[in-house]
Amino acid sequence: MTTAQARQDLDVQPTPLALLLLGREADARSERGVECPGDLPSPSDPDLVERARAAKEKLGEKVFILGHHYQRDEVIQFADVTGDSFKLAKDAAARPEAEYIVFCGVHFMAESADILTADDQKVVLPDLAAGCSMADMATAEQVAECWDVLTDAGIAEQVVPVSYMNSSADIKAFTGEHGGTICTSSNAERALNWAFEQGEKVLFLPDQHLGRNTAVRDLGMSLEDCVLYNPHKPNGGLTTEELRNAKMILWRGHCSVHGRFSLDSVNDVRERVPGVNVLVHPECKHEVVSAADYVGSTEYIIKTLEEAPAGSKWAIGTELNLVRRLANRFAADDKEIVFLDKTVCFCSTMNRIDLPHLVWALESLADGKEINRIQVDKETADFAQLALERMLALP
């Protein structure tokens, strides 16, 4: 019996989400994107590096390549600038002479670059399937339904949305339209302080851990001040009383990389590496952040290690490509840098941007073929930019 016959006998039809995950359907609002058209070079092609260099040289100042910290080394070597998502989007906006912005990152990052760059600049994502599982955990429809729940509870007017940079353009637009702001892991405390000056409650999207850690660790709230809104449950899985009593309404979303780290990871590395300093990203779970010695954004992690004394030992709780790059960079300074967890933890979607995809994108552009352009519609872009501008104006 074939799979199709078995499915027919069971009267089971694949859901749209299942088809999307299988790569058989597309969703313009999804961070997962779709498979790239065209033929990619073979990953075993020994000339890939030279082909990338040649295509980039042919394009000259027409192209500006952005490389996120979590990218592979094979890709990072061709980046004109590296950084976190917001820094890269701002860097792109500061290069108006570049006709093409090739963003080696994930979909929401390319959207932010398109929002912040000029209309005549074209943002290209080498693989449209390079999405973000965290960003996918909050859709525009789900957030609109949540706002209806808050309205029915009589508290919507008291709530200010604060959305993490790691969100889709639709969610940023919702935030801007409803009087909220965007935040990064570097300025989340300032964003929340601003939000509580505007209203009594915050709806924090889409990363529950950054919201909880910032509220409790930085603003001095209690865990009881925070409730978790689950978009897959009626009323978010919360009672009206719970919503009315909460200060922080956290969306049930998380980073698939940082969410892997556990308290056991921290305890284990302290046993394995005596005298180790544990340095983690605030997207980690609250118990991990509480047990760490240092907590901060990707840029904070890099700066902390730059300033660390020779001979110091560090266990880093963030994406493995970056940790490995930092370990190699500071090895000559006798700084021991290890991954917090024993198991490999790459960002799988970020790693979709590999050298074959980059070569394909650059060669296509060099041949005059515009591919994989990321465009945000004007209304969405306008409201999203409003939210981003509020962040830039934070005191």
Image (cartoon, helix red, strand yellow):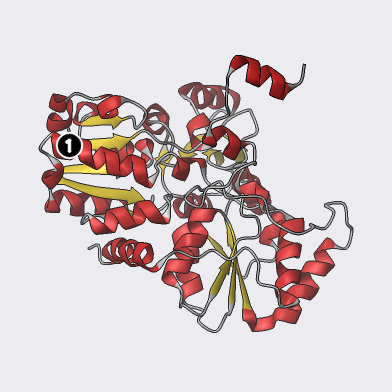
Q: Where is residue 202 in the image (x, y as percent from the top left)?
A: 21, 43
Q: Position of residue 138 (x, y in %)?
A: 39, 41
Q: Which residue is drawn at 25% across and 67% down?
A: 393
Q: How crowded is mark 1: few (under 14 residues within 10 Å), some or many (20 or more)?
A: many
Q: What element carries label 1?
A: loop
| Quadrant (top left, top right, bottom left, bottom right) of the C terminus | bottom left
**96 vs 351: above or below:** below
Q: Mark 1 points at which residue?
A: 247
Quarter residue 250 falls in: top left
| Quadrant (top left, top right, bottom left, bottom right) of the N terminus | top right
Would residue 346 be seen by someone viewing this image from the given angle? yes
In this view, the residue farthest toward the right is 46
Q: Where is residue 141 in the image (x, y as percent from the top left)?
A: 35, 43
Q: Where is residue 367 in the image (x, y as percent from the top left)?
A: 76, 76
Residue 225 lies left or right of residue 83; in this view the side is left
* Camera-side residue of 389 and 260: 389
Quarter residue 336 falls in: top right
Q: Which residue is drawn at 24% across and 36% down?
A: 249
